Image (spheres, coloured by chain):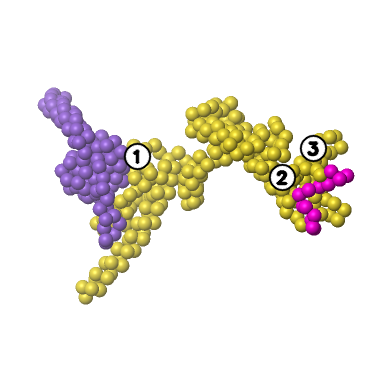
Chain colours: A yellow, B purple
């Protein structure tokens, strides 16, 4: 008899726990605009307290989660909810936290996109740069240094230490939009450049051209170190491919020449 | 008289006094406040007050694991909290004494 009674109480308690976990989850949803630490601090141990409350006073002692969250927030000296968290889906806050945590990585990536964009716009990529196509210069050292300097500037802007930082003036907002838009454009252009160079390299050195030296072109008995293609206006075509009469790709550059 | 407004003004003091007597978890503090005569105190108000006092350094906290259910978060008073309790107790005694004297004087005065 006693065992049956104890089992019933245990089942009831388990049901209560499930309900209260759901209730605490709802309360947390109404605190979704707070940072994760503050929200955890406010609700840690809450489930245990509510178990006792419900056991002593019944489910009726629980108010609506939004009212409970509002009272909790007010008593903790926190400002009322800035926006209606009910409109935000469950994944919104974790996704936002991840995005915020990833911001430093974006600041560094943004710096890379900008130095690559400026490099490609201001200087025609020299063929020597093909050795490190994903850096803005011809060498690892200089390229990494330039990227590092740009990254420091980008991080300081991201942290609000440099203008436009986190200013709210119109000029600062416009500058930030341009900065981010330029980053996206730079990333696309730079990625296209890297892809092009790697593809070019593969075309030049990767194809089977028979039993001849695949890296050497001879023209009128003279060995050519590289082939360059220019358009009708004399502008160099960087993404050109040169093939022979049989459609085999010719090497555009001989590294050992 | 609406005791809710009065309660808001003295909740910090009441919570500090309860925790000063003995460490406690959220609902335990609520229960002790109600047993002391503050029946209208809301549990969410007490929990929020505990968190605020903790953030201000007046309380410390520790978690006690429970095999039967969720873990309990206990609060204890810090030296800063004791100093704050003393200051607020003095303020309350001064305020309550002044109001009591005022009420005693006006009670005997002719209408």
Magenta region? A209-222
Q: Are marks 2 and 1 in contact (CB under 8 Å)?
A: no
- Is residue A86 depicted above or below A165 in this figure? below
Dot 1 or dot 3: first in sequence order is 1
Q: Which residue is mark 1?
A: A74
How crowded pointer 3 is (Cα within 10 Å; few <14, some 14-19, many 20+) is rated as few
Residue in view at x 24 percent, y 45 percent: B75
> Which one is nearer the viewer's eye here, B109 or A103?
A103
Dot 3 or dot 2: first in sequence order is 3
Residue B53 placement, left or right of A148: left
- Helix, strand or loop under label 2: loop
Cα separation, mark 1 vs mark 3, equals 68 Å
Cα separation, mark 2 vs mark 1, equals 71 Å
- Helix, strand or loop under label 1: helix
Q: Position of residue A34 (x, y in %)?
A: 41, 42
Q: Position of residue A179 (x, y in %)?
A: 60, 33
Q: Residue furthest front?
A: A221
Q: Which residue is mark 2?
A: A255
Residue A99 in view in this figure: yes
Residue A149 shown in magenta? no
Name the magenta segment's main secondary structure.
loop
Picture quadrant of residue A188: top right
Picture quadrant of residue B96: top left
Chain containing mark 2 = A
> Which one is nearer the viewer's eye here, A12 or B19?
B19
Residue B105 placement, left or right of A18: left
């Amino acid at each position: 008899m006693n065992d049956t009674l104890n089992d019933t109480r245990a089942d009831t308690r388990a049901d209560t726990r499930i309900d209260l976990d759901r209730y605490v989850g709802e309360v947390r949803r109404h605190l979704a605009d707070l940072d994760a630490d503050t929200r955890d601090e406010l609700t840690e141990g809450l489930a245990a307290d509510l178990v006792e409350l419900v056991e002593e006073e019944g489910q009726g002692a629980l108010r609506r989660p939004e009212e409970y969250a509002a009272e909790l927030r007010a008593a903790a000296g926190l400002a009322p909810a800035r926006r209606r968290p009910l409109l935000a889906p469950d994944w919104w806050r974790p996704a936002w936290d991840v995005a915020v945590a990833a911001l430093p990585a974006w600041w560094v990536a943004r710096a890379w996109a900008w130095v690559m964009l400026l490099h490609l716009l201001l200087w025609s990529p020299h063929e020597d740069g093909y050795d490190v196509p994903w850096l803005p210069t011809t060498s690892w050292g200089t390229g990494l240094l330039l990227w590092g300097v740009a990254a420091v500037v980008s991080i300081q802007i991201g942290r609000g230490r440099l203008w436009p930082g986190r200013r709210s003036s119109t000029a600062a907002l416009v500058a930030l939009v341009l900065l981010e838009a330029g980053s996206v454009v730079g990333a696309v252009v730079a990625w296209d450049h890297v892809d092009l160079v790697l593809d070019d390299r593969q075309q030049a050195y990767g194809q089977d051209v028979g039993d001849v030296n695949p890296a050497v072109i001879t023209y009128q008995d003279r060995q050519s170190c590289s082939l360059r293609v220019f358009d009708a206006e004399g502008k160099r075509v960087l993404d050109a491919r040169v093939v022979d009469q049989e459609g085999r790709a010719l090497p555009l550059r001989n590294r050992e020449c | 008289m609406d005791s809710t407004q009065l309660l808001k003004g003295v909740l910090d003091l009441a919570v500090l006094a309860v925790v000063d007597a003995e460490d406690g978890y959220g609902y335990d503090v609520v229960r002790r406040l109600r047993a002391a005569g503050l029946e209208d105190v809301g549990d969410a108000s007490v929990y929020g007050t505990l968190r605020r006092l903790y953030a201000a350094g007046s309380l410390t906290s520790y978690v006690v694991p429970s095999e039967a259910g969720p873990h309990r978060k206990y609060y204890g008073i810090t030296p800063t909290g004791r100093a704050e309790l003393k200051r607020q107790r003095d303020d309350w005694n001064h305020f309550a004494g002044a109001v009591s004297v005022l009420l005693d004087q006006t009670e005997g005065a002719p209408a």
